[in-house]
Image: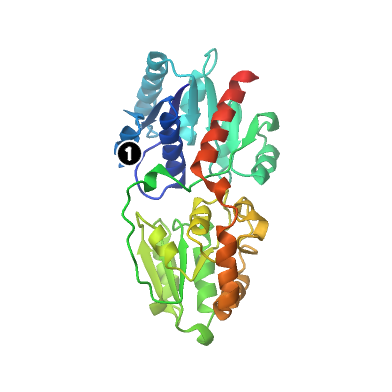
Amino acid sequence: MLILHLLNHVDRVGNGIVNVAVDLACLQARAGHDVWVASKGGAYESLLAKHGVRHVRLDQSRRPMIIWRALRDLRALIRRERIEVVHAHMVTGYVLARLLRPGASWRLVATVHNEWQRSSTLMRGADRIITLSEGGVDRLAARGLPRPRLRVVRNGVIGSPRDEGAAAPVLALRQPAIVTVAGMYERKGIADLIVAFDALGAPHSNAQLYIVGEGPDRPRFEALARQLPSAERIHFEGFQPAPRAYLRDAALFVLASHTEPFGLVLAEARDCGCAIVATAVDGAPEALDRGRAGLLVPPHNPPALTAAMARLLEDPAEQGRWRDAARENVDWLRVERQHRETLAVYQDAFAR
């Protein structure tokens, strides 16, 4: 099969959409398919080349002349390479491909990675639309996307080509270490987590909070932390290219998101054997086997986060049981499963 993935960029900045698409492209090429990635470029170009994926520069910046050139160049690429499947992972790439789709024999597949974005409804015209959870089907259908075209392919991360040959840094976090790995955005619930951590109070005055990630709301979160008694125990670590080092050394992993279509980091935390606390939103319960692999609490609820963290910090035996539970039934979180199911969606787009 001749497959083209469309992305804004392939930078190594912790972007889950990019990580998923890069993994898929590498595994598809490894399986013998001819695979291209078109984007503005970035650090993952060398990894793609190593796995036989051809990267083509395609600037999709939202300016009229650049978009016109991108449309022209995308049409030429599809025709020249006789592409059979165009897989769009971001809205701009989808719109470009959709403009070229009428009358063409190739199929357009779109993955709605961020179903909470209003712009995701634009993807309703794809031949097949991939969502990341069973709940995502209902949510997207309710927003007008055609249910017969919706398919579920949950994210996989275990065995990612991005981890091949990577040195495993060893950290010595101050314990007990509570870790979160997330973009610094309001929707990730970072403020809730900071408030909940501070409320642990004197019984857990030695606990440390490590916030791994970068984003536009970081200054606001830092300002909030500075106002609290626990300020010196809240550590903003920024973007880390190897966040698993933090997961391996964590007493607890917490994801306090307000919205979370699936969350690659939950799969990574399970693979590292973390005791996990997460909010019960969107696809997070599915990523945690409906609460069998991690504690689920309501979103927007710092007291519930505080209670869950205190419960695990105060009972090492229970913390150990949740570590063991996280490691159980993780084969379905492997990238190979996601790769196989994605190919099945491509084939389905041709069959019907």
Circle 1 Cα neighbour tier, 10 Å, few/some/many (<14 / 14–19 / ≥20): some
Whole-percent x and y of residue 31? 45, 29
- Which residue: 52% across, 14% down? 104
Is 247 located above or below residue 234 in the figure? Answer: above
The quarter of the picture where residue 258 lies is: bottom right
Whole-percent x and y of residue 302? 59, 71
Quick one: 68 or 1, which is closer to the camera?
A: 1
Tell me the amino acid under the disc marked 1.
Leu
- Which residue: 54% across, 80% down? 200
Can you identify the residue that label 1 sits on? 47
Whole-percent x and y of residue 94? 49, 30
- Which residue: 32% across, 61% down? 169
Task: Provide the secondary structure element on which disc 1 rests.
Answer: helix
The quarter of the picture where residue 242 lies is: bottom left
Q: Is residue 306 visible?
A: no
- Which residue: 64% across, 54% down? 289
